[in-house]
Amino acid sequence: MLEKNRYNNREISWLQFNARVLQEASDETVPLIERLRFLGIFSNNLDEFFKVRYATVKRIAQAGKGAKKALGGITASKLLKQITQIVIDQQSQSLDILSNIQNELREHDIFIIRENEVTEHQAQFLKDYFHKKVSPALVTYLLNDLEEIPRLKDSSAYLAIKMILNTPHNAKVDEKQYILIEIPRGIDRFVEVPSDDGKDYIIILDDLIRYNLQSIFNIFDYKSISAHMIKITRDAELDMAGDLSKSYIEKLLSSVKDRIEGQPVRFVYDKNIEHDTLHFLLSKMGIDDSDSIIPGGRYHNRRDYMKFPSLGAKNLLYKKYSALPVKGLSMQGSLLQKINEKDYLQYTPYHTFSYTIRFLRESALDPKVQTIKITIYRLAEISHIASSLINAVKNGKSVTVSIELRARFDEANNIRYAEQMQQEGVKLIFGVPGLKVHCKACVIERLEDKKLKKYGFISTGNFNENTAKVYTDYTLFTANASILKEVNKVFEFFETNYKVNKYKHLIVSPHYSRSSFESLINTEIKNAKQNLPSGIQLKLNSLSDYKLIDKLYQASRAGVKIKLIVRGICCLIPGVEGMSENIEAISIIDKYLEHPRLFIFENAGDRKIYISSADWMTRNVDYRVEISCPIYQQDIQEELVKTFEICWDDNVKARYFSHESENTYVKNNLPKLRSQFATYDYYLENLAKQ
């Protein structure tokens, strides 16, 4: 079979994932304001895609490399054109969805008004608001006399102003003044306007500025003025080379700042902008056909819709569910004592994330705890995790933190916390040269009967109390000495990375994941050929490693039944006769972001089950430090299998993967099952059985 028919292209598959997010924005069963927020997620995803993936393909094309093998059978230059066309179509669709949502909001007495719809009652408020809060923050560029436009900030939105000046009657050509106004990012994008009729009115900051253009430019004598939005997206790759005298943190900070100056990869503009204004801007900025030039709507940075105000309209929002306790694990008394008796599984956001914080707080206060070691990839802006670790140092504990400063788009936040923790006496490890540390693990040592006893947790997601409210993730709390001894080995590797440790229980990238996953698949192939129970069930964010995909194809041909739940990129093509007829694959996009990695291998009836920080992508398998942790306790094994089955049975929010990549919803004659709601009910019912 030709290579191009064996794999879905990674970038195109990612765009299909974002199309599923857009489906949520158009789904009339989703509460109305939540649909607006999905539009924001769609836009935010697209921004990051262009900064990272499109920029990478563009660099390949500029280097004159075809890279067909790496790109799944298509040249880089052709892929850039294909991406641009798909994005143009998706942007057009998103504008139609936004228009429909706004029409429906009006039916609920919520009005998003433009500058020409302001009433006399609202006028004075908007003028006062502008002069007090907006005007002092405006940055305005007069472009005519500048040789080139100042470097526009990555993903900031600008109003491109064309002013036609009053000129003498004998002038042959109207004099034009071109201006850019940067939309301030530190001010709420959605301004709630006082109402005297019981209805809700909102004006977008862009239109508030448009409403006050006369006030801004009152020193000019003009006969007409127009304003259209533009946005530029830049390559987000960090350059860590350079001055050897600089510290790692200094280099990273400098590189993050330089990201603002990265090469442009996408230019989005209001499709109603005048041709001469667009031509002026493109020529001044040196933007050409190698960049993605995309006509859009009146507003850009629609990612801001993620923060659209709730307006007290509970009927237009998802119903809030209280996070549940973990069965048998009380927040009263000692968590460590409970964990010493048995393992526990926390599945956020169905369970409260508070157990993770409580574990660290108890460890910080317990006089018998000697050491704490933890990996950190992304922290909340205000992090109780970090404060607990600092508290532990103040209480005399030895605290070691492996913090990944290169966590994309969180570099500045992580640097800030790294400097704070370092000042407080936390021992910091800045990863491993050439590898990102992406695993999520913690191990503590407690003095018990003159011996050091280990406790810890291993997770599929970040130790971040904010994302834990919307990302689904498993965390195993354990006192299993064999597992935690090997977690300690991972920390040893951080400091002596020339030494490769051996592991009996954990599967650790970059040295063992590929061979271990292949061995596990080979076992299923062998069992299938011997008519022993076989099967593979994987839940992942992304599946793009061609070698592992080929291994799954091999298993399918041997008769192994394979079920895949993949939220995002899926380069594997299921259901193809002679290649993957025994593979089924679905994706679930719903209220929460599906984030856990779960691997279930039938193993002739003696199941092997792992939770993991690693997707089946080449970067996770070969170029990151990752941990896949075995689950030995039977009740937790059963819990993980059950939660997988609930997701697999989803016939409301699940979509099929297929060669056509049409994002077709799973439909059958079974009772409706929405897996995220059903998972919450499953845990609620379990609590009732206590």
Image (spheres, helix red, strand yellow):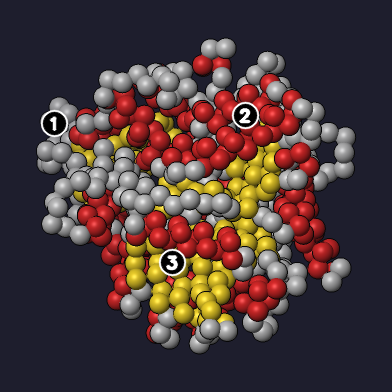
> Splitting the image into 4 quarters, where does residue 671 fall?
top right
Q: Nearer the viewer, residue 231 or 629?
A: 629
Q: Nearer the viewer, residue 499 or 471?
A: 499
Helix, strand or loop for disc 1: loop
Sequence-wise, the earlier of marks 2 and 3 is 3
Note whether residue 517 is visible. yes
The answer to whether residue 344 is above or below residue 141 is below
Distance (Cα) linking label 1 and label 2: 74 Å
Query: Can you tell which of label 2 and label 3 is closer to the viewer?
Result: 2
For label 1, count other residues whose C-alpha is less than 10 Å away and answer few (under 14), some (14-19) or many (20+): few
The answer to whether residue 329 is above or below residue 459 is below
* Mark 2 in CB contact with mark 3 (< 8 angstroms): no
The residue that disc 2 covers is 552
Q: Residue at x 28, y 65 (%)?
A: 136
Q: Residue at x 39, y 33 (%)?
A: 54
Q: Residue at x 88, y 35 (%)?
A: 669
The amino acid pointed to by label 3 is Glu
